Amino acid sequence: MSTGTHITEVYDALIALLKQRVPGVAVESLTDQQFDERNGRLLAKPPAVFLALRDEQLDRRRDHTATTYQSAQTFLAVCGALVLRSTEEQRVGALELLQKVCDALAGARLTLPSSANRAQVVLGAVRLAQFDEEGTWYELQFTVDSVAQFSANAT
């Protein structure tokens, strides 16, 4: 049994944090209902923030049982806005939402039920994800750093 950082707990903590600090915007996990994998396009209606786990890196710490790891979970926060008046206002709206998300996440410490340690959020790269009639979407990559402890005798 793991006593470290569970991915579902991190998702829940991130969503709760963003809903609290960025009110009035839909905040959810990214699912196939919002994303068309075949065409690589977001289908959801902005304004919205969608979270997706990209990967997790586990680096072994110095323990002889190899059950303690430094965990770095990389997430994507996809932030979108739709303004029908002009594409410039739409771009500005998406960037303003992205800035609010960055402000909410930068340096945040997440309290997770399964861990005595608090996981820290570290911001990474930003890129344009989509720009079309469905809205302007920017993608923020960030990591959640924590310690993961696993049981050597999990069943």
Image (cartoon, helix red, strand yellow):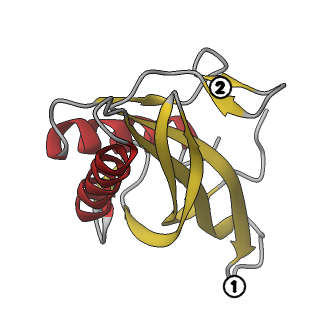
Image-quadrant location for residue 7: top right
**Residue 74 image point, x, y percent:** 60, 59
Q: How many marks?
A: 2
**Residue at x-position 38% and y-position 51%:** 91
The reply, left or right, for residue 55 in relation to residue 70 is right
Q: Which mark is residue 148?
A: none
Instruction: Give the residue number, with chain letter if any, for mark 1.
Output: 62
Left or right relative to 34: residue 102: left
- The quadrant in which the N terminus is found is top right
Instruction: Establish if 149 lies above or below 153.
Output: below
**In screen coordinates, is 66 left or right of 9?**
right
Q: Amino acid at mark 2?
A: Phe
Helix or strand or loop: what does disc 2 sit on? Answer: strand
At which x and y percent is residue 55?
71, 54
Q: Which mark is residue 35?
A: 2
Above-or-below relation of 148 to 37: below
136 vs 89, nearest the viewer? 89
| Residue 114 in picture, x, y percent from top left | 43, 44
Mark 1 near mark 2, Cβ–Cβ under 8 Å?
no
Give the amino acid type for the residue marked by disc 1 in the picture: Arg
Snapshot quadrant of residue 64:
bottom right
For marks 1 and 2, give the CA distance: 41 Å
Q: Residue at horizontal 66%, vertical 69%?
A: 69
Q: Residue furthest top?
A: 33
Q: Determine the secondary structure under disc 1.
A: loop
